[in-house]
Amino acid sequence: MKSSLLLALLMLAPTEVVVRDGESLAQVAQRTLGDRGGASELKALNGLKDDAVAPGTKLKLPGPDREHAQRSLTTARNALAQADKAARREEAAAKLKEAESYFQGARYEDAAQAADGAWKLVSTSPPPQPGGFSVAVDDKGNTTVESKSGPPVRVEAEGVTRPVYAGESVRVEKGQPPPPPRAPLGVPQLTQPPHKQKLTVQPAKGGPSPVTLSWKPVEGAEGYEVELVSVRGEKRQLPANTHQLKVPLSAGAWRWSVRAVTREARSEASAEQSFEVAEAQAKPINLHVKPTNWK
């Protein structure tokens, strides 16, 4: 049996999905895009007038331009979150809002262009460059493909093709087709503490009191990676088994973001947010001394 393994970067063509019995448009979006909010995209992409879809209906799914738009939006949000005093921040925020509106309407190319425009208004750094992929073959002829960043990589063997998304690795056994693809992990949404919140913590013995960080759970995630960066440049990467983490933090300003992870894949980082930690002031101790008759 002839075996071949072809690798190439490609723009994946849109596919279709069949609506299941009793499934809402939001549930279809969760199943295919990893985000219930993607219902508005499916609605626009398929020219639907409302959210009601009959079982058996075939819906067109977004192509690779959606992933490109997502990366552009994430980059713009992160740049905007770090540009508190940028001269054109308000203009960039309006541009980002325009990009998000395009994205919800499945106008992905327009969304990417608007998001890139927002990024340029507040950033002086060059945009991140694709990191490509790596291929490793073991002694038995099994091949492991790891996509590090950028657009998905196509893996083809035994007449079967599947995408390998950024942060994902796939092992293809010799003479076998690649395993079926997993849906890309959704990007976590940070919930607590709110952006730019000032937190006051009580002093504790042995170190600072813990701060609770939380985010919305991501379907299919086996864990999470939390990245914290202090105003002094200290960087901490912490694992979390649930969508919440308590971590002791020293006083000062912090930025944070979260990725969803599995054994084989990591999601894009969430939009970065910031908060400030301050220790509560100790209450003064009042001493009352009773007068005596001693002379």
Image (tube, rainbow, N blue to C red):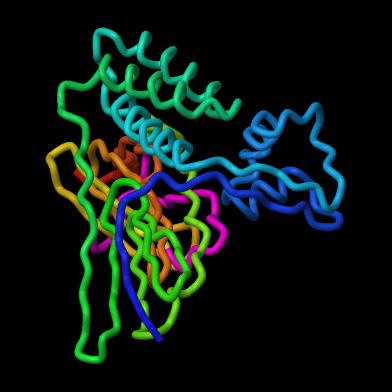
Magenta span contains residue 216: yes
Image quarter for residue 158?
A: bottom left
Q: Residue at x 34, y 68 (%)?
A: 169
Q: Is residue 134 above or below residue 284?
A: below
Image quarter for residue 80?
A: top left
Q: Position of residue 66 (x, y in %)?
A: 48, 38
Q: Is residue 92 above or below residue 273?
A: above
**Magenta region's main secondary structure?**
loop
Q: Is residue 50 above or below residue 123?
A: below
Image quarter for residue 121?
A: top left
Q: Residue at x 40, y 44 (%)?
A: 11
In this rendering, position of residue 37 left or right of residue 277? right
Q: Which quarter of the rendering shows the C terminus?
A: top left
Q: Residue at x 87, y 46 (%)?
A: 54
Using the image as rendered, state which of residue 38 and residue 159 is in the foreground: 159
Q: Position of residue 3 (x, y in %)?
A: 36, 79
Q: Is residue 284 visible?
A: no
Using the image as rendered, state which of residue 27 and residue 165 is in the foreground: 165
Q: Which quarter of the rendering shows the N terminus?
A: bottom left
| Extreme-bottom residue of the structure | 140
Q: Residue at x 38, y 63 (%)?
A: 265
Q: Position of residue 168 (x, y in %)?
A: 36, 63
Segment tinted magenta in the rendering: 199-223
Q: Position of residue 55 (x, y in %)?
A: 85, 52
Magenta span contains residue 236: no
In this rendering, position of residue 58 left or right of residue 160? right
